[in-house]
Image (cartoon, rainbow, N blue to C red):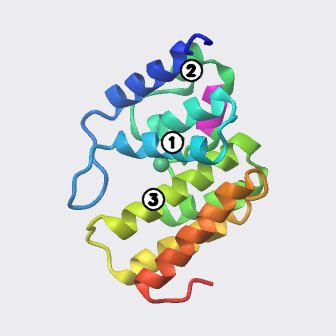
Amino acid sequence: MDAYSPYLLEAICYAAEQHKYQRRKGFAKIPYINHPLKVARLIYKFKPHVEESILLAAILHDTIEDTDTTAEILEKKFGAEVAQLVLEVTDDKTLDEPSRKQKQIDKAPFLSDGAKIIKIADKICNMLDLLHYPIKWTDERKIRYMKWSKDVVIHCKGICPDLDKEFDHTLEKAKALLNTQIE
Ligand code: ZN
């Protein structure tokens, strides 16, 4: 059997340490680290031969945006490819929320394949959390989030058809649960 890559556990521990005081939005107060781990697992589920750099970047995808990590630190620890992927899926926090959301849509067509895969898996996991955990959001706000996710993901499809299908399936589930059309 091949030796396990030391980077995978290193990335999990590093992300866990970076996010250790953070919780997901909502009442359930789920530890933040559950989210990037689920994103990585979802990618692996639908693309078992995915490059390790993409899995590592999925585990680390929110560390630059939400913790004091920098691209330089990630590059040193996990290599330039991983750092670049995380940067690609990092929002510019100097912008206000509507501009950040628009920028995600505008940037999506130009992301690398790996970043597109992470984006789709991230949106699926966020949608599932919104649907299945209590959160103080109105249904209208949830629907707005689903529509926006669709607008981002539409530019990210075509690399992993099974993951694309899973997104569509999740959107269908959201429509049914929120009893609405999301066009
Ligand atoms: Zn995320």
Task: Residue 31: name its quadrant.
Answer: top left
Q: Residue at x 22, y 57 (%)?
A: 28
Task: Residue 44: name its quadrant.
Answer: top right
N-terminal-most mark, 2 or 3: 2
Kindly report which numbered mark, 1 or 2, lies closer to the viewer in this rendering.
1
Name the side, left or right, on which 139 lies relative to 80.
left
Rounded to the nearest whole Å, what is the CA distance between mark 2 and mark 3?
27 Å
Kindly report which numbered mark, 2 or 3, lies closer to the viewer in this rendering.
3
Q: Which residue is mark 1?
A: 41
The amino acid beneath tag 1 is Arg
Q: Can you name the residue that lies furthest to the front here? A: 1
Dot 2 alpha-carbon crowd within 10 angstroms: few under 14, some 14 to 19, many 20 or more:
few
Task: Tell me whether the residue at label 1 lies in contact with that at label 3, contact meaning CB atoms closer than 8 angstroms.
Answer: no
Q: Residue at x 58, y 10 (%)?
A: 3
Which disc number belongs to residue 72? Answer: 2
Q: SS class of the residue under badge 3?
A: helix
**In this picture, which residue range is highlighted in magenta?**
82-87
The residue nearer to you, when weighing 144 against 2, is 2
Name the side, left or right, on which 136 lies relative to 171.
left
Which disc number belongs to residue 111? Answer: none
The amino acid beneath tag 3 is Asn
Rounded to the nearest whole Å, what is the CA distance between mark 1 and mark 2?
25 Å
Give the quadrant of the C terminus.
bottom right
The spot of residue 180 in percent (x, y) is: 49, 89
The spot of residue 30 in percent (x, y) is: 26, 49
Residue 112 visible (yes or no): no
Q: Can you name the residue that lies furthest to the bottom here? A: 180
Q: Residue at x 52, y 72 (%)?
A: 146
Dot 3 alpha-carbon crowd within 10 angstroms: few under 14, some 14 to 19, many 20 or more:
some
The spot of residue 24 in percent (x, y) is: 31, 51
